[in-house]
Amino acid sequence: MQITRRDFIVSSVAATAMSPLRSIAVSDEVNPFIKKGAGMLKGISPVISPNLLKTLAEMGHGDEIVISDAHFPAHTFNSNVIRADGINADKLLEGIIPIFELDAYATPVIMMAAVPGDTLDPSVEAKYRKALGYKGEIERVERFAFYERAKKAYAVVVSGETAKYGNIIIKKGVIPV
């Protein structure tokens, strides 16, 4: 397929103008302005925005990233906030885990505990475990302790997750040689 200089410039300008939408484009139905496969890398899920990919690459071993639900007060607790509106947390985790090594020296998965008197929906943890392919221990921390941890996290990714207690922290490990 031949592309003219004019077509290239028009598509480049459109891609730049639409870049905020690119991070939420998971299908043509969500964003009809982005051509299918545009801007994607082999082996990288389309739910991983360029900013999220950069952030994951910058993180070192022991760094943590919060994948929050849509209601999480991300900007209150962290200055490095990435929006992933419309994308459920389990889909983000599925996209992240092939390129992200979980910490092998500490509990790498942390979730918020239920507030006293409230209950957790076990399906939330189950879908996160499945997305991560993770069978190990999940540390549960009290709500305000979770917020403190979010302050120290490398970044917070605000997902479109609407499940109650749909917040999760994953800790980066070292890629085995």
Image (cartoon, rainbow, N blue to C red):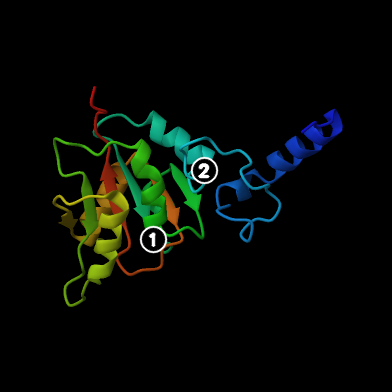
Q: Position of residue 130 (x, y in %)?
A: 28, 56
| Callout 1 secondary element | loop
Is residue 92 at least partly visible in the picture?
yes
Figure check: 154 above or below 36:
above
Kindly identify the amino acid type of the residue bearing the numbered disc 2: Ser
| Callout 2 secondary element | loop
Rate crowding at label 1 as few (under 14), some (14 to 19) or many (20 or more) other CA atoms within 10 Å. Answer: many
Q: Position of residue 164 (x, y in %)?
A: 32, 69
Tell me: 108 left or right of 5.
left
The disc, 1 or 2, on the residue closer to the chain's N-terminal end is 2
Kindly identify the amino acid type of the residue bearing the numbered disc 1: Asp
Rate crowding at label 2 as few (under 14), some (14 to 19) or many (20 or more) other CA atoms within 10 Å. Answer: many
Label of residue 49 in the image: 2
Q: In the displayed image of the protein, which residue is found farthest to the bottom?
A: 117
Q: Residue at x 41, y 46 (%)?
A: 95
Observer-nearest residue: 77 or 33?
Answer: 33
Quick one: quadrant of the N terminus? top right
Q: Quadrant of residue 175?
A: top left
Tell me: 57 left or right of 47.
left
Q: Position of residue 85 (x, y in %)?
A: 51, 57
